[in-house]
Structure formats: C-alpha cells, structure tokens
Image (cartoon, rainbow, N blue to C red):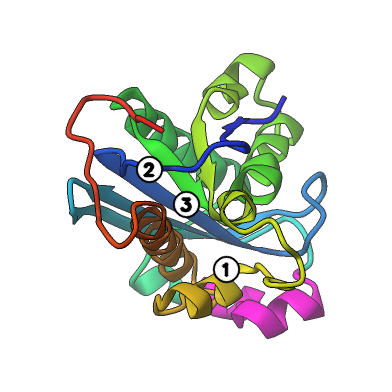
Amino acid sequence: MAPRRRRTELVRWVPPLLVGFDTETTGLDVAHDRAIAYGVYAWRLGAPAQVERFYVVPDREISEGSRRVHGLDRERLEGLRADHDVLTPLAGARRAREILGAWSREGAAIVGANVAGFDLAMLRATLLDLGEGVDAVRVIDELDVVDVIDHDLVIEPSREHRPRRTLTHLCRHYGVDPGGHDAVGDARAAVEVLLRQVEHNQQGQMVLDGRSGPRW
C-alpha cells in the first residue's frame, strides 16, 4: 500500500503545516536498498519549525552511482559520529517513522519529489525487511503526501514544455535554491517548490490556509 497522493488537483492553498522529507540512499531499488541519510524540514505558517538530519551506516553496499550523487561512503558516515546521530538501519527507519507520524498527527502534509514512490516506499520496505510488522508501517500508508513532481504535471502536463522534472529541474524552473543532493537541503527545496507552485496557481499570491487541516 502506498501513501495517499494528490494526483489530480491543483494545490491552491498552502496548508498550515508542511513537512519536507528526503533521503540519500545506497541505490535506487526501493525493495532492497537502504536510506543512509534522512532529512526533515518542517514549515509552519510561513516559517521553519524543525530541521533535522540523521545518518545510517547501512547493511548494504553503497553503489558507485549513488556515491557520485551524494558523496557519502561508509568511511564518511562513520566519521560523522562526532557531530551527528549515526544509527543502524532499523533505528534510523524507526526514527523517521516516528517523526513523520508525529507531524502527521498534527495534520501535516508530507512534501517531496517522488517521495511516495521512492523515499517512503524504501522506508516502508526497510521496516518490513528488518522485522517490523504491518501495523508498524500503517502510519506511512496513512500519510497525506504532496509530490511536487506529480503536482507539476497537473500544472503543466506537456512533456514538451517540461521534458525534465527532477527536483533540480523544478528548482531551476521555480527559482528555488537547489538542495544539492543533501537530504535536509532537498527536503527544504521541495517545500519551497510547492510554495512557488501555489503562488503560480494563485497568479502570484501566496495564500495560507490557517485552518487545522489541508485544503486543496
């Protein structure tokens, strides 16, 4: 089961609580690979509310292609212990689930780029693979998710006008500083892309919804 996704509607109001979520990983196989860096960027009524990052020493090899993208290898991860939380794969996945669950209970929308199909899918698979039961991933299945790539396809369906829609390309299009393949940076960038998308949908205005739940 995948988290709920908003595929067919424009987001016209900014929910009062947005939580950007991103991971850096050992590879691209959501059923097999592991997250090695988690980033959370919470945005409440116009201002950052929480910025959190933590790392994982994986029980998988880090692919060369992934190392080239995010610059993380096992030696560097071990070296981060002095200044950052560096966890086991299960402890990291549990912590990510707990953070997202806590924000979700406050009514947050989880924001990212391919976040349901990649980051959350890998988180779910990791928890199950490492012995957590189906009940333990229910919080992931029940998240409200806004994927900025899906949303951009609603805004502009033409592949001719927007042939590439990675987070980097969307940052360039909407004038947002890219995250640079850093988990917190990309989580922040996804939130800012969504804010620019809402401005586009409202013809240049940022419209906050001060009510307790998202309005789309």
> Is residue 106 placed above or below 164 in the rendered structure?
above
Residue 211 found in image quarter: top left
Per the image, is 66 magenta? yes
x 73%, y 74%: residue: 66
| Among numbered discs 2 and 3, the one appearing first in the sequence | 2
Camera sees residue 85: no
As drawn, is 19 to the left or to the right of 166?
left
Q: Are marks 1 and 2 in contact (CB under 8 Å)?
A: no
Crowd tier of the residue under label 3, counting other residues whose Cα lies within 10 Å: few below 14, some 14–19, many 20 or above: many
Percent of width and height locating residue 37: 53, 62
Question: Which residue was labeled with disc 2?
Answer: 12
Does 154 sit above or below residue 70? above
Give the side of residue 109 with respect to residue 155, left or right. left
Residue range (magenta): 62-79
Residue position for label 3: 21
Q: Secondary structure at mark 2?
A: loop
Contact, mark 2 vs mark 3 (Cβ under 8 Å)? no
Report the disc number at residue 199. Answer: none
Residue 10 image point, x, y percent: 49, 42
Question: Residue 31's image quarter?
Answer: top right
User: Whole-Å distance between the Cαs marked 3 and 1?
Assistant: 13 Å
Instruction: Reply yes or no: does residue 68 show up in magenta.
Output: yes
User: Of the residues tagged 3 and 1, which is closer to the observer?
Assistant: 1
- Magenta-drawn stretch, dominant element (helix, strand or loop): helix
Look at label 3 and name its amino acid: Phe
Q: Which of disc 1 and disc 3 is earlier in sequence?
A: 3
Position above or below: 141 against 29: above
Q: Write the residue at 61% across / 36% down.
A: 8
Query: Which is nearer the eye, 185 or 212?
Result: 212
Q: CA distance from mark 1 to mark 2?
A: 20 Å
Q: Residues within 10 Å of mark 2 (few under 14, many from 20)?
A: many
